[in-house]
Image (cartoon, coloured by chain):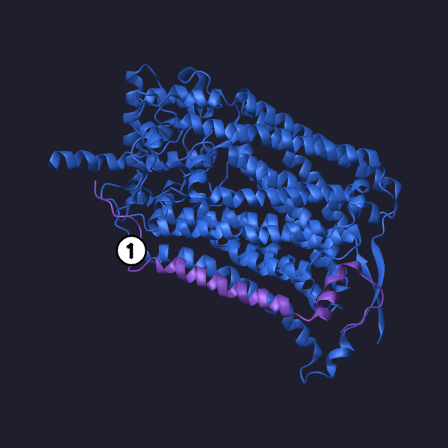
Chain colours: A blue, B purple
Amino acid sequence: MELEKFKYDNQIVKMFSIATVVWGLVGMLVGVIAAIQMYVPALSFDLPYTSFGRLRPLHTNAVIFAFVGNGIFMGVYYSLQRLVKARMFSDMLGKIHFWGWQLIIVLAAVSLLMGYTTGKEYAELEWPIDILITLVWVVFGWNMFGTIIKRRERHLYVAIWFYIATFVTVAMLHITNSMEIPVSLTKSYSWYAGVQDALVQWWYGHNAVAFFLTTPYLGLMYYFIPKAANRPVYSYRLSIIHFWSLIFLYIWAGPHHLLYTAVPDWAQSLGVVFSVMLIAPSWGGMINGLLTLRGAWDKVREDVVLKFMVVAVTAYGMATFEGPMLSLKNVSAIAHYTDWIVAHVHVGALGWNGFLTFGILYFLIPKMYRTKLYSQKLANTHFWIGTLGILLYAVPMYWAGFMQSSMWKDFTPEGQLKWQFLDTVTKMIPFYAARSIGGTLYLIGAIIMAFNLYKTAKAGSFLADEDAEAMALTKNYQGHSTDHWHRWIERKPIQLMIVSLVVVIIGGVIEIVPTFLIKSNIPTIASVKPYTPLELEGRDIYIREGCYVCHSQMIRPFRHETARYGEYSKAGEFVYDHPFQWGSKRTGPDLAREGGKYPDSWHYNHMLEPNSMSPGSIMPTYSWLLDDDLDLSTLKSKIKAMQTLGVPYPVGYADIAEADLNKQAEIIAANLKKDGIETSPKKEIIAMIAYLQRMGTDIKKTAVADTLKK
Amino acid sequence: MKFINYLETIAGVSIYPLISLIMFFVFFAAVTFYAIKADKKYIDRAKNIPLELPNQSQD
């Protein structure tokens, strides 16, 4: 047997680690600003670019794809080389991957602040960036498989299975959910509409949590915890069961985000059943991680790396216990649309992803810089301040969630709703304030870490190429098979990828395909008509300003919701909604039946100064809608794109759409004039009012018609 | 107001959850069986990969 000498590439790991820290700080900072905006709406500065509706998607995208994304690549590039005893396949591909990903992040940040968004949560980026993501992801996969194929370790350690499943599933999710018809370079419409769009979106959204925030980090857990504790994982057999059942089950659970909505009942039930079962593999994984440290708890007391990892795995256990509970229909009825969900995801993001990333950084940086950590004391401070931050974040949000929900449901003995929606908002303000303090503490901890790691790097000397040696695999297997040895080895990772793909496809196919096949059979509601051109433009402004991050458009069939908002939402009402805008959070009230509730002038004044119409409101002002002219340059292509998607505008309608738009705008301007508001019909606010006044009114027309018939 | 819900018209739609559950249990049983029966030498070998012990044999 021949001992081969080679070098591990630490340079690429270093690059990703710096990006992880930098984007982490940016993402957290934007989060803190957005958190403060929720009780100091003036912090929007009356500018479109800094309004909550645009900052919040920036925060979520930055944390998920920039902070955790770079964290994944940092951990994968470090561990994969050592697990397969080979240098990364190509330094050049690694660099393309790194700079490509950073370019995506910068483009994402700029475009989200500009208001270029698809309006689908966690998939907000517009189509050119979607394509770029696909290309860079392929480069990542190419580099990963190239490395695996030239490996010097026959067995693929379980962490690598998680990496492979991550690669293939994220590719599938991203491509399926990003199907859209471009209207211009910065605008597109989702290929799917209404219920189908919702199903695809939450199949994606849920599994982005699964395959971007969970599986790669479980892979990292399986490498870095044994490494940091210097002992093998508790049970390798358990990890095999953990892997396969986790990836099989996760993909089915998406519909639990849509309980009591207009999604078909059987799909909801399927989502619930699989979500509840998901607790088993999740806890299997958590137990496996924690029990790895059995008999080594004295080390945990000493070693800050292990401290972070233990809290991370514990947070994972809490979040994955809570997840299945939240999927029960009766619990979802309480938690959905409230701050409880915000608490839940932050236990995952701050605890699991954040703390595991910090643990890995504290482990890697001293190792790669061949020195000791600059200050153990500062690292311990970070640990405690971070933990306190998580608690101060989560506890008020849980409390707020329960309070909101019970206030929404409260009836007086006379059978009237006890609280105005606004009452439930103003009661939240102390909780929002406490949450922002928790978030700030967490950010301060991360800043301390950045300083500590910088000092460590300064004191040490970086080892770009780490010497390693291992026996080649070549000779062993030549005798066993008539095939060339290389082909035999190559087949295994590819087989693993294909089997993983099959396993994750099953759930998706069973849930989504029937809903699609049946499209032609949907008994549409006769009175539901496509949006007028002005309403369509107004809807695009609604999407641009990110209204969906605070307002839902989905009334659930509960007494307290129908009493507050009106008739519950029906699947057939959304057939022309590309994309759907059901939302997932009610910081403000539901808008599904907003049309006709208030006069046009109310909306005009409300957009200018929300407080003047709803005293105590925390909605920021949208005064630019009153000043800016509506851009009609893409109206024609929008109508044509909608026709391509099957929206039944008459043939040639694109050419006369603008005339129709102007007519409707004149009417709204005249309405406003009656209430003493002089404005040009060309302003954006006119389109916005048109859309708001249309919302949910179509089925009322049938109700009127039915009454007349009788 | 007349409105028929999605998929109510599909005959026997309740078979979907049933198929799904059976599929998962078969799959889960197979994986568990495989994990329990897996060769102890392979398990020990794979388990120790991250620790990079020197001069392991490749079998």
Give, as a three-letter code, the residue at label 1: Ser
Residue B41 placement: quadrant? bottom right
Which residue of the protein is positioned furthest toward the front in this rendering?
A: A295
In this rendering, the answer to whether A623 lies above or below A14 is above
Q: Which residue appears at 37% of the width and 42% of the height? A: A261
Residue labelled with disc 1:
A520
Question: Helix, strand or loop at disc 1?
Answer: helix
Residue A470 placement: quadrant? bottom right
In this rendering, the answer to whether A400 lies above or below A211 is above
- For the residue pair A95 and A306, the one nearer the viewer reads as A306
Q: Position of residue A485 (x, y in %)?
A: 71, 78
Q: Position of residue A207 (x, y in %)?
A: 53, 50
Placement of the C terminus of chain A among the 4 image quadrants: top left
Q: Which residue appears at 56% of the width and 38% of the height? A: A344
Q: Is residue B22 left or right of residue A661?
A: right
Report if residue A627 is visible in the image: yes
Report if residue A594 is visible in the image: no
Residue A163 placement: quadrant? bottom right
Q: Is residue A463 left or right of residue A252?
A: right
Q: Which residue appears at 38% of the width and 50% of the height? A: A196
